[in-house]
Amino acid sequence: MIDLVIVGAGPAGLGAAISAAEYGLEVCVLDEFVKPGGRLLGQLHEEPDGKWVNGIAEAQKLYYRALQLGVKIKCGVSVYDIAKLESGWCVYTTDQIYETECLLLATGASETPIPVPGWTLPGVMSIGAAQVMGNVHRVKPGEKGIIIGVNVLSVAIARELQLCGVHIESILLPQSSFVSGDSAHPEKMMESLLRLTHLAPSPLIRFGGKWVNPKIGARLYPRNGFKMWGIPIQLRKTALEILGEYQVEGVRIADISATGEVVPGTEKVLSADFVCIAGGLTPMSELASVAGCSFRYIPELGGHIPIHNECMQTNLKGLYVAGNITGVESAKVARAQGTVAGLSVARELHAIKQRADEIIDIAKKEVIDTRRNALIQFQAGIEREREELYDKGNNVFEEKISV
Amino acid sequence: MNSMRVTDHPILGTLENKKQVTITFDDVPYPAFEGDTIASALLASGVRTLRHQEDKGTPRGIYCNIGHCFECRVRVNGKNTVRACLTPVEGDMRIESGGEL
Ligand SMILES: Cc1cc2nc3c(=O)[nH]c(=O)nc-3n(C[C@H](O)[C@H](O)[C@H](O)COP(=O)(O)OP(=O)(O)OC[C@H]3O[C@@H](n4cnc5c(N)ncnc54)[C@H](O)[C@@H]3O)c2cc1C
Ligand code: FES
């Protein structure tokens, strides 16, 4: 029986593999993608000091460190079921069945689709699909694109696509009838964009970040939008339909009011050879629910979250979670959570001989510090919601989990 | 190879000389780089339609590109329901689009 099987070779999974292996555990990481690194692979960010963070290089560092420590990493393997054994867990994969003492789910997040009419046409893809095509596979998703959905991720990826030599014609909103929630609401979207202002070279949005409140921002907002890196961000335009016979040829759009209603008589067609849909991220927690974890719905963390404590233990013995499955945050936070999970497993298996609690406390603090310094805040209120979750969680865990 | 490739990137650098292999999609040969997925290799050659929907015959291509949605399913060397976005190319790989039933 293996000490620890990890599902997902993203920053959380690899971070956990490294910290567990450093205490001598036998660790095996499984991932269905072609390369290790998870969604970190596609990322490319400019830090405030002007340095670029290249996700591929970051992922490679984690991968090599894990290999050095003897971690087994298998790519191209999908995990489709897990089951509790008398002691430990059984993991069913497309490759073989694994038995393990402890199991960590680090499956990350998935994108929420927005069913805009015409969205099944070839050339329509999720915003993350375009990111992976351009930055990881180094193939342009198309020459001229339109992005439906304005959020921190879509604006950041628009910039990355531009660096790949792709022209982004417009980033605009979906229609309110296609989505639930705020993604069709100009005022709400203004609010979410303001969390990105420190990344923006555009004086208009920086200006906005300083002292325009979102309500006024959306009302004063110029009908033709403003530009970031030369890309038009159009919070007062909406996509009605994606057009094309065999593949994408364009998008029918219209003006909308500050509260999202279509202004009659303003329809027109923009041409494009690809369209990205950016509906936001939600934790990918199917395996946790198959295992029988308890869940809580926390919108600030992106949706249904398997209940866990600050040591990343779920309410089932030997089952841990880390990274975006516990709430949508940036890659550095995921990695820091992974470290905590790996150490917690090492403690459960008595591999940390001395000062285990102290070591884990330091790692937990690192998660909080990393969160506070994160460049991209996906939602407001993450820290508050986490604190509440862990306060409540700790009571549940004292009874159920004995370490 | 052609204009859909991001050969030079201001931050990620220039693509090193990658080994080229040939795959066939519905009996047409296409060039691919080692390390490509089926989906990325075909898109690099401008191929977006990977199959036709079983019911209505409408064309479909990739959607998520990371294995979640199964929109990209094709037949590879006789095996059904293979995700083009997760499958690395190999020399002489025979890929077929799923068609209308
Ligand atoms: C499309 C997309 C784009 C993103 N872009 C950014 C960005 O630009 N900046 C940013 O800060 N954050 C971004 N994020 C957030 C991102 O999730 C975090 O930055 C970080 O990568 C989360 O790390 P993780 O280890 O939790 O999960 P991930 O990095 O997502 O890794 C999870 C891994 O688990 C694997 N996996 C999942 N289920 C299974 C299974 N059943 N069997 C086998 N393997 C499985 C996946 O293949 C994946 O490699 C993005 C997320 C997505 C989904
Ligand atoms: S495109 Fe979604 S699974 Fe391949």
Image (spheres, coloured by chain):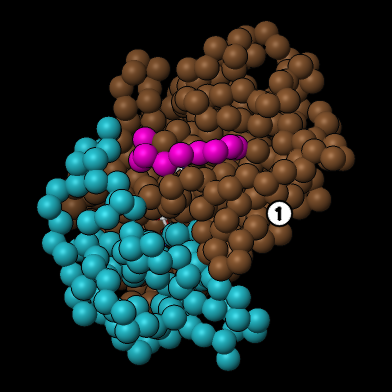
Chain colours: A brown, B cyan
The subunit letter for the residue under badge 1 reads A
- Picture layout, residue B64 above or below residue A252: below
Residue A270, by quadrant, is top right
Q: Residue at x 59, y 17 (%)?
A: A205
In the image, A241 versus A107, the foreground residue is A241
Q: Which residues are magenta?
A: A163-171
Residue A287 shows in this picture:
no
Lateral position of residue A85 relative to residue A135, left or right: right
Q: Secondary structure at mark 1?
A: strand
List x then y, in percent, for residue A346: 33, 49
Q: Residue at x 53, y 34 (%)?
A: A155
- Is-magenta flag for residue A130? no
Residue A206, by quadrant, is top right
Residue B95, by quadrant, is bottom left
In the image, A217 versus A82, the foreground residue is A217
Type of amino acid under label 1: Glu
Number of dots carrying numbers: 1
In the image, A323 versus A160, the foreground residue is A160
Lateral position of residue A325 relative to residue B74, left or right: right
Lateral position of residue A230 relative to residue A175, left or right: left
Lateral position of residue A75 relative to residue A194, left or right: left
Residue carrying label 1: A241
Q: Residue at x 54, y 78 (%)?
A: B52
